[in-house]
Amino acid sequence: MTREIIIQNIMTNYGKYGITPDMINEVIDAGLEGGMSYDLIYLDTCRRISEITGEEFLCSSSDMARAMGVSEDEMTRMIEEAREELIEAGEDPDEYFKEVQSTRFMM
C-alpha cells in the first residue's frame, strides 16, 4: 500500500464525513513517525473513522497479517489466542472476531 492509495481509499469510503486529504496526510505522517507500515496505518485509520461514524469496521485476517508483518498462519494463531483470552475474561470473542466462509472462483 502507498500513501496515494490510502488517501484514495479513505476519500472514496469516508469522504462523505468531511474527511480531507490534508487530514489523512497528517495521520499518515504520524503513523510513519510511530513506526507503522502503510497497511497498518490504513487499517487503523479505517477503524478509527468507523468508531467515530458508528459504522462497523471489518477487515480480513490476511489484511491484518500483512499490516502486522506476520504470516497468515501466525495471524490465525494470534486470533485464536485472543479469542481464548476473551473467553477467559468473560467476554464474547464474536464481538471482536467473526468467522466467515469465503468462496473463491477461478476461471
Image (cartoon, rainbow, N blue to C red):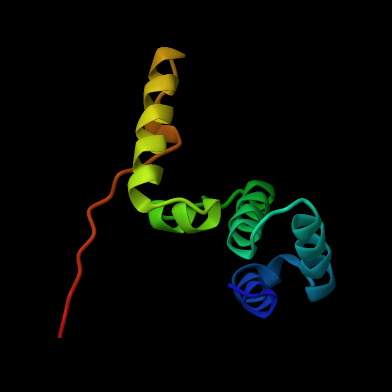
Residue closest to the eye, 38 or 100: 38
**Residue at figure coordinates x 77%, y 51% from the top left:** 34
In the rendered image, the quadrant that contains the N terminus is: bottom right
Residue closest to the eye, 4 or 16: 4
**Residue at figure coordinates x 62%, y 62% from the top left:** 42
**Residue at figure coordinates x 43%, y 20% from the top left:** 85
Residue 96 x, y percent position in the rendering: 45, 36
Q: Quadrant of residue 90?
A: top left
Residue 95 x, y percent position in the rendering: 43, 34
In the rendered image, the quadrant that contains the C terminus is: bottom left
**Residue at figure coordinates x 22%, y 53% from the top left:** 101
In the shown orientation, is residue 91 left or right of residue 99? right
Residue 40 x, y percent position in the rendering: 60, 56
Residue closest to the eye, 81 or 55: 81
The mark tally for this picture is: 0
In the shown orientation, is residue 5 left or right of residue 80? right
In the shown orientation, is residue 35 left or right of residue 73? right
Up-down: is 4 above or below 72? below
In the shown orientation, is residue 23 left or right of residue 10? right
Up-down: is 81 above or below 77? above
Residue 17 x, y percent position in the rendering: 71, 65
Up-down: is 48 above or below 27? above
